[in-house]
Every structure is written in C-alpha cells, then in structure tokens.
Amino acid sequence: MEPFLINCLHAYFYFMVYSFGGWVVQGLYVGAKDFKFVNTGFFHGPYVPIFGFGCLFIIYIVDRLSMNPFWVFVNTFWLTSVLEYVTSWYLQKKYHRLWWDYSKHKFNIHGRVCLLNSTLYGVAGLVVTYIFQPWMEDLVAHIPLHAMEGIMVLFTIVFGTDFITTNREMGRHRKALEQLHAHVQRAVSSVAYQDEGFAAAVASLQKMQENSRHVRGFVHQRMDEAYQTSVDRVNRHIQEAGQRVQQVQDRVNARVQEAGARVQAVQDAAASRMQQAHESVESHVQEVSRRVGTCRDQLNAEAAGSGSGQKPEPVLTGAGKDGASDVSQTAADAVSEPKSQ
C-alpha cells in the first residue's frame, strides 16, 4: 500500500480512538458532581466525533505550526475554539437547538465557547501532543496492516449506520418541532382553530419526545434538564390555553342561554298581551251584541203596538232618541276600543 494511503488509514484510526477517548473523558467530567458516568454522545455509539477532529487538527496542523509547548497551547486554544463555535452554530442552524450553553460562564461568546473550556482544550492539546500521540504512534506501528483495515472497515459500518439513523431521528425531531411551533402560532392567532391546533401541537410534542433519545446527549448535563423543562413548559402552556378556550366557551354558552331566556320572556309577555287583547275584544263584541238585541226588542215591541191600533209608547222621543244615540255611540266605542289596544 502506498505511504499516502497508509497515512490516511492511520489518521482514520486516530480519529476513531480519540473520538472514543473524548466520549469517555467528557462522560466522566459531566457526571463527576453526581459520581456517575453520563452518556453525552450525540450518536448512539460510544464516540464524539468533534473530539476526533480536534485531535487530528492538533496532530496534523498544530504540531507542525508549533515550535514549543507554549505555541502548542496557544494554537490548540484558538483552533479548537473556532471548531467548537462553528460546530455549535451549525447544529443549532440545522436542528433548531443549542447543543451546549456556556452563557453562565465568564468570558463566553454567544454561549458557544468560553475561556474555561478553551483553556482546558489547550491543556488537552499539550497532553495529546507530548503524552498520548507518541504512544499512539508506537501502537499503530505494532498493529498489522490487515488487522487495522479490518478494524476500520467494521468501525466504518457501525459509524455509518449510526450516522444515518441519528440523522433520520433528528430530521423527525426537527420536523415535529417546526410543526409544534406552527400549530401553536396558528392556534393563538385563530380562535376557530384553537381546539384543532392545540390537539395537533400535543401530537407534535409527543413525536418530539419519541425521537429525543439523542437530546439527552447534550455536552452539558444542564441542557438535558433544560430540555425537559421546556417540554413541561410547553405542556403547561397548552393546558392553560385549553383552559382559557374552555372559559371563553363557557362564557359564550352562558351569554347564549341568557339571551335565550330573554327572548323566551319577551315571547311569553307578547303571548300574554295577545291573550288579553283577544279576551277584551270578545267582551266588547258580546256587549255590542247585547245592546243591539235590546234595540231590536224595542223596535219589535213598537211594531207590535202599531199593528193592534194602540198608541205606542214614546220610546224614541226625547230620552228615547238619546238612548238610541247612546247605544250607537257604545257600539262605535266597542268596535274602536280593541283597535286602540
């Protein structure tokens, strides 16, 4: 095999070993406060590629630019800081999530890098350059070429499968997060969509939780707690919004019932007045009929008296005329009175 290919194979082997070593060191560092090991890896497997790339930069760039330990420290300091900042920016841009947060550390830049961690990376550069790398070069020299090829083929299959699986999970997670945001925004802006929108938001949140295994692998343990806090906060907001919607619906229903009661009261009052008017009309009609019957009887009596040759009683003279006028006026009043009511 050509020397160039052999050097590439060795570099790939260094990447594998330092990715695993970074995963171990970081898990111990994060879990030191609780005296336990914390899996902080982004992938399913036991490796953190950013540490593998960082060590390759130290081996093939920093060591060639540095003439003494001081420059090894300085070059490792700024180079790993740039790598960490760019990686944080890319992951947040792609997955809408901040994977580590140094905002509570002094001398940080946008929470992506801080003086403490960059200093630790500089010290790690010294350790890698003067302790681990000489030992790694000696180890590589004693591994047969065909054995190293087999190891790297196996690692490539495992890492490639893990890479594809994790990115598919993150794609579903990101899609669910975007849908959650869209449903909540639409539910807040549209009253008619609130019930359906909040139900869809809950479904999207459940999808996020189903694909959030890797989210527990934040570089800083506090981010895991912050993620769970954010999930709880979204749940609480959804519940509060549902309660507000229910309260609005209850108020609307109460007002509808109150308006219905008022309409029923108006209908009852109108029916009562119509009944009273009907009874009043019937009473006046009966009174008119009675008076008309009285007049008819008097007229019949006069006609009977004239036929027998007797002098009729002066029923329509003087007071009789006034009585007839009174009857006519009473009949007219009886007819006109229901119209006025």
Image (cartoon, rainbow, N blue to C red):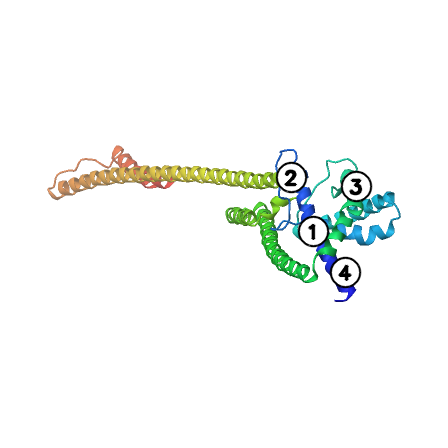
Residue 176 to residue 285: above or below: below
What whole-number distance in Å separates the C-alpha atoms at marks 2 and 3? 22 Å
Residues at marks 4 and 1 touching, judged by CB atoms closer than 8 Å: no
Expressed as whole percent of the image width and height from the top left, the position of residue 47 reads: 66, 50
Tell me the residue that label 1 is attached to: 17
Q: Tell whether label 3 touches label 2 (CB within 8 Å).
A: no
Circle 3 residue? 123
Mark 4 residue element: helix
- The residues tagged by marks 4 and 3 sit, at their Cα atoms, a distance apart of 26 Å
- Helix, strand or loop for disc 3: helix
Above-or-below relation of 200 to 161: above
SS at circle 1: helix
CB atoms of marks 1 and 2 within 8 Å: no
Within the image, what quadrant is residue 294 found in?
A: top left
Distance between mark 2 and mark 4 Cα atoms: 37 Å
Q: Residues within 10 Å of mark 4 (few under 14, many from 20)?
A: few
In the drawing, what numbered circle is on residue 7? 4
Q: Amino acid at mark 1?
A: Val
Residue in front for this viewpoint, 290 or 275? 275
* Separation of residues labelled 4 and 1 (CA atoms): 15 Å
- What is the distance, in whole Å, between disc 1 and disc 2 at their CAs? 24 Å
Give the residue displayed 64% in from the left and 47% down from the top. 41
